[in-house]
Image (cartoon, coloured by chain):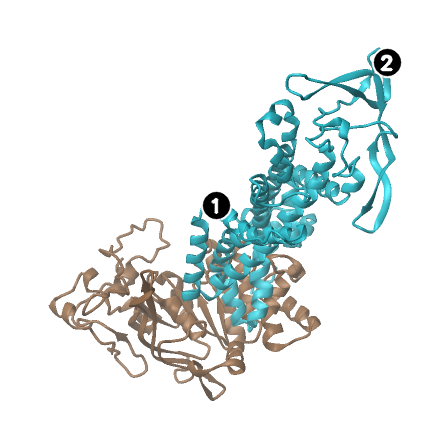
Chain colours: A brown, B cyan
């Protein structure tokens, strides 16, 4: 892993959605979907972004893709030594960026237009961003389909004739079409059967090796990202609570929320008895966040200070090369259980 | 990497010959699905028949709608016979002529079947002259009698005009006014619903409130008020277009809502986001992603809106504020049945109503079939 070769860097990214109510549609509040997060992804590396539903992981992914415009913060994309300020991109420049940064969607049904053939779906970026001729597109699409393990003869078919796993492969082929450097994978396997999840993840890993891709891999459970991720960022209600490499996160978690997520990772052993830490209460409403540490109402270790003061994301790493960020007042005091303890 | 490509055919357990099915476009799938809806297909055939009759009205009707048979005021329908009174079978159908006497108390005519006067029916006979669509001059009729005979399949009205011929001509106006009204209100609905759904926010709010207000008016008084605004000196053509306009100004709301809802749901589908990230321009997204997903639903909704238009036109004309003679529509024809005196002695004056019912049911069944077929993927993917 090359530490100092970032492909994507985000700093203090915020995305707030205004909330309107009443018949006059007055602004009555803001949903802080993403609130001041920073991380970077190195070239050829996978960053796993994990958190419960509604914690802002998808919003993060979509903001990076500029499907959504950030409320504040910076996004930098490194393209062969050039640093591109993604937030300021418009028009032709934004289209250039979309050639390098691509996205795979969660729902393999909603992400493929049912009224277009696979050829046209996978060929769309080739046509719109590269202006290739019909014949070139046809050849390229056939190659792409074979790359992702589909039969090139099925290019003329419509999406309904494929199963969920195959559809997701089509989505992957579409993302690969322009030789990208970064792919935002928005829960690419959570809509699939368990048996297919492994297949698709393996495919993604093989493609990463072959094409030197960097992934932002969004998922809602740690078990999925464990194998594919080099580093993992844990997100809770719009904020990052822990960021470190996958190995450290699984063996030496520093945040109680990470501990709870680890406890719910499914285990392959047959006699395994689930003793997950069940989190009390609900994920807080991002419109009305609890004071202090967001996690304190559900935290087993919370104390006075957690209610009054918001913890900073600090580096507790033992050495320079291996930073370990966590946002907990007691990161060094409490002894959390790791993956093997459950 | 897995060297063996995944075979969809193997996974689904379907055979290779289903390739045609897998490569079927949405219209093909919809057609296959629609075909299975037997009632809807029957309805389409009935409607085709009706439209055919309306287009070739001059040829189908034995008489011109305004020609009066002065000796045959309020004559009952002729019944078509194959068997003569003596028991002999005639291959050529015939009707018996009428004799009438005057009821001295009421002054109305009493018709009696004259068994001695057999009038054979001929197909493709020469009869009254007409100009089809104002250009084709002819005197050929689908059926009729020879000179001197008469045939009133559905009786005659108070002026001695053949009701069947009038219904056939009335179909022209009743059906075309409904179609035109639906096209206008459809355009209006798509524009308003499209703006509402695509832009959202304040414009959406205003358009939705306006359509709610329009929907909450009681329709008949509103129609009456608008119709009263039509200047009386207008020609029948102007009057006709005026009615179309009135019907569509009120009728666009439901389609507008449907288009808005559809846009709202499709706009958030991942494939639209994906298309944008693939560099598709907004016109391309609308043309390739939004419209194809909506067209079938819009067609189905429009079909289901036609009956409302027909009812609206019929009711307006029936209460005398819509079309008026010399224009002939089914509503205009029904207007004469308002007088109870006639209704008791001549119940056949209600027959235009039967045609209204048949056409409305057919449009409803066809619309049902179209609506079921409009999303051919819902049953395929799950």
Position of B252 with respect to B125 (left or right) is left
Looking at the rendered structure, the secondary structure element under dot 2 is: loop
Position of A271 with respect to A149 (left or right) is left
The answer to whether dots 1 and 2 both sit on one chain is yes
Horizontal and vertical percent position of residue B228: 54, 50
Question: Residue at image x 45%, y 67%?
Answer: A185
Residue carrying label 1: B221
Count of numbered badges drawn on the protein? 2
Horizontal and vertical percent position of residue A299: 20, 62
Residue carrying label 2: B88
Looking at the rendered structure, the secondary structure element under dot 1 is: helix
Question: Residue at image x 57%, y 53%?
Answer: B230
The quadrant where residue A294 appears: bottom left
Of residues B280 and B72, the one nearer the viewer is B72
Horizontal and vertical percent position of residue B28: 67, 51
Query: Residue under mark 2: which chain is it in?
Result: B
Residue B285 against residue B56 in the figure, above or below: below
Front position among marks 1 and 2:
1
Confirm whether residue A114 shows in the render: no
Of residues B210 and B317, the one nearer the viewer is B317
Position of A40 with respect to A137 (left or right) is left
Question: Residue at image x 35%, y 63%?
Answer: A222
Confirm whether residue B263 shows in the render: yes
Question: In the rendered view of the protein, which quadrant contains the C terminus of chain A?
Answer: bottom left
Horizontal and vertical percent position of residue B67: 77, 37
Q: Residues within 10 Å of mark 2 (few under 14, many from 20)?
A: few
Q: CA distance from mark 1 to mark 2?
A: 58 Å
């Amino acid at each position: 892993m090359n530490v100092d070769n970032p492909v994507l860097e985000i700093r203090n990214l915020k995305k707030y959605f205004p909330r309107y109510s009443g018949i006059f549609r007055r602004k009555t509040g803001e949903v802080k979907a993403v609130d001041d997060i920073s991380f970077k992804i190195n070239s050829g590396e996978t960053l796993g972004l994990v958190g419960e539903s509604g914690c802002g992981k998808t919003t993060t992914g979509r903001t990076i893709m500029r499907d959504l415009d950030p409320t504040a913060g910076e996004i930098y994309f490194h393209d062969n030594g050039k640093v591109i300020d993604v937030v300021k991109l418009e028009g032709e420049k934004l289209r250039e960026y979309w050639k390098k940064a691509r996205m795979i969607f969660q729902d393999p049904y909603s992400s493929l237009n049912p009224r277009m053939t696979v050829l046209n779906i996978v060929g769309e970026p080739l046509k719109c961003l590269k202006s290739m001729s019909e014949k070139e597109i046809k050849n390229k699409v056939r190659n792409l389909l074979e790359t992702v393990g589909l039969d090139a003869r099925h290019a003329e078919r419509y999406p309904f004739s494929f199963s969920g796993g195959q559809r997701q492969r089509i989505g992957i082929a579409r993302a690969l079409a322009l030789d990208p450097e970064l792919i935002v994978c928005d829960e690419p396997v959570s809509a699939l059967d368990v048996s297919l999840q492994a297949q698709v993840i393996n495919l993604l890993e093989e493609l990463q090796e072959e094409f030197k891709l960097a992934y932002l891999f969004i998922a809602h459970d740690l078990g999925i990202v464990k194998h594919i991720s080099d580093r993992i960022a844990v997100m809770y209600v719009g904020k990052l609570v822990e960021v470190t490499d996958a190995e450290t996160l699984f063996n030496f978690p520093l945040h109680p929320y990470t501990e709870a997520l680890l406890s719910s990772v499914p285990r392959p052993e047959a006699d395994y008895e689930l003793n997950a830490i069940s989190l009390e209460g609900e994920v807080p409403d991002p419109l009305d966040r609890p004071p202090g540490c967001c996690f304190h109402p559900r935290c087993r270790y919370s104390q006075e200070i957690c209610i009054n003061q918001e913890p900073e994301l600090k580096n507790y790493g033992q050495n320079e090369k291996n930073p370990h960020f966590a946002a907990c007042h007691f990161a060094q005091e409490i002894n959390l259980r790791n993956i093997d303890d459950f | 990497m897995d060297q063996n490509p995944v075979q969809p055919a193997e996974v689904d357990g379907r055979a290779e010959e289903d390739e045609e099915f897998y490569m079927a476009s949405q219209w093909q799938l919809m057609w296959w699905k629609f075909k299975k809806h037997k009632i809807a297909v029957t309805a389409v055939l009935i409607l085709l028949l009706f439209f055919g009759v309306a287009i070739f009205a001059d040829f189908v009707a034995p008489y011109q709608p305004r020609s009066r048979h002065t000796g045959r005021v309020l004559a009952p329908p002729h019944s078509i016979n194959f068997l003569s009174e003596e028991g002999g079978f005639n291959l050529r159908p015939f009707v018996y002529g009428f004799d009438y006497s005057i009821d001295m108390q009421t002054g109305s005519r009493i018709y009696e079947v004259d068994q001695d006067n057999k009038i054979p029916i001929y197909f493709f006979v020469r009869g009254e002259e007409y100009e089809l669509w104002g250009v084709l001059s002819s005197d050929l009729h689908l059926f009729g009698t020879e000179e001197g005979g008469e045939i009133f399949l559905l009786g005659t009205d108070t002026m001695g005009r053949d009701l069947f011929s009038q219904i056939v001509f009335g179909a022209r106006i009743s059906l075309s006014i409904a179609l035109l009204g639906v096209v206008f209100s459809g355009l209006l609905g798509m524009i308003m619903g499209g703006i509402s759904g695509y832009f959202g926010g304040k414009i959406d709010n205003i358009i939705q409130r306006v359509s709610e207000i329009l929907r909450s008016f009681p329709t008949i008084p509103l129609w009456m008020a608008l119709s009263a605004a039509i200047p009386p000196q207008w020609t029948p053509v102007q009057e006709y277009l005026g009615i179309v306009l009135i019907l569509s100004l009120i009728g666009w709301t439901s389609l507008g809502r449907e288009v808005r809802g559809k846009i709202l749901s499709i706009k958030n589908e991942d494939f639209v986001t994906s298309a944008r990230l693939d560099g598709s321009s907004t016109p391309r997204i609308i043309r390739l992603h939004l419209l194809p997903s909506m067209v079938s639903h819009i067609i189905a909704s429009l079909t289901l809106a036609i009956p409302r238009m027909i009812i609206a036109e019929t009711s307006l004309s029936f209460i005398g504020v819509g079309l008026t003679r010399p224009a002939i529509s089914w509503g205009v024809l029904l207007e004469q049945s308002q007088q109870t005196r006639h209704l008791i002695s001549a119940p056949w004056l209600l027959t235009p109503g039967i045609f209204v019912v048949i056409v409305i049911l057919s449009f409803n069944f066809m619309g049902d079939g179209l609506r079921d077929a409009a999303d051919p993927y819902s049953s395929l993917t799950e």
